[in-house]
Amino acid sequence: MSVMTPAQVALRQMIDKSRYTVFFGGAGMSTESGIPDFRSEHGLYRQAEGKTYEEMLSIRFFLNHPDVFWAFYKKVMLHPHAKPNAGHYALARLEKQGRLKAIVTQNIDGLHQLAGSQKVLELHGTVRRNLCMACNQVLSMEAVLAMPGTPRCHCGGIIRPDIVFYGEPLNNDVMDESIRAVMKCDLLIAGGTSLSVYPAAGLLGYRREAKLVLINLTPTPFDQRADLIVREHIATTLDAAISA
């Protein structure tokens, strides 16, 4: 067993004292599973050809250019072979212990659920569920990948991924439940996120007396409000700090 860093020891002590922990995660949570960070220096948005990825992931672009969107989406946004990393499994362990009450994630990859987590609030939806725009038939990620070109339902309707496109509001029910979880917690761990994307980052404003831990390799706008800052890889940190 490797020796824990001082920051990991401090995080373990905070977790051990907590009875209502909430985890708030972003793209950095999944980079160690091979899924690129959209906004990092070497992430997807820096690789756009002709258009930004923000534009291509907008509801307007999808509705106006579904064929172009689906070609891009299948090639770039879907990672069917990605597996949960040690951080995902560590959070699932903490939930099983009864101390992690909710995971609030900005990610759309579904890796928390694959690791075994049950209470996952997906602010931006999920690539693992797709909906017919005509009849609301639900299709899996594997089903749409198996369809050539733009996937269509048996009724003829165009399929859309069940994600929140740019230009669309967040799901009110998911947002409200996330707010309630943050308001109840005594420990809020935010990891793998720049905390610069709103309204998601605004959730931290609902924290009451809870301790705040930030696990991120680079500074965030909330650093001065944190009780503990960990500048280490998130998967390693969570795996070390959360006992089996």
Image: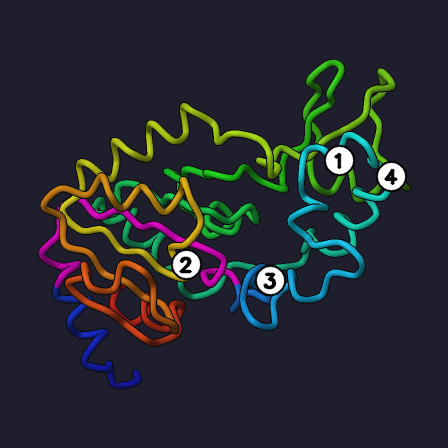
Q: Position of residue 155 (x, y in %)?
A: 84, 15
SS at mark 2? Answer: loop
Tag 4: amino acid: Asp
- Residue at left offset 55%, top offset 65%: 33
Give the Cα distance between marks 1 and 3: 22 Å
Quadrant where the image shows the C terminus? bottom left
Question: How many residues crowd around disc 3 within 10 Å: few (fewer than 14), some, or many (20 or more)?
Answer: many
Q: Nearer the viewer, mark 3 or mark 4?
A: 4
Residue on which the image places disc 1: 62
Label 3 belongs to which residue?
Answer: 35
Pointer 2: residues within 10 angstroms few (<14), some, or many (20+)? many
The answer for how far apart the CA atoms under marks 1 and 2 are is 26 Å
Element under disc 1: helix
Which of the two discs, 4 and 2, labels the residue nearer the N terminus? 4
Q: CA distance from mark 3 to mark 4?
A: 23 Å
For the residue carrying disc 4, how many other residues have a C-alpha within 10 Å: few (<14), some (14-19), or many (20+)?
some
Q: Which of the marked residues, 3 or 4, is nearer the chain's N terminus?
A: 3
Q: How many marks?
A: 4
Q: Earlier in the sequence, mark 1 or mark 3?
A: 3
**Residue range (magenta):** 14-30
Q: Residue 114, how many percent across, how many down?
A: 51, 49
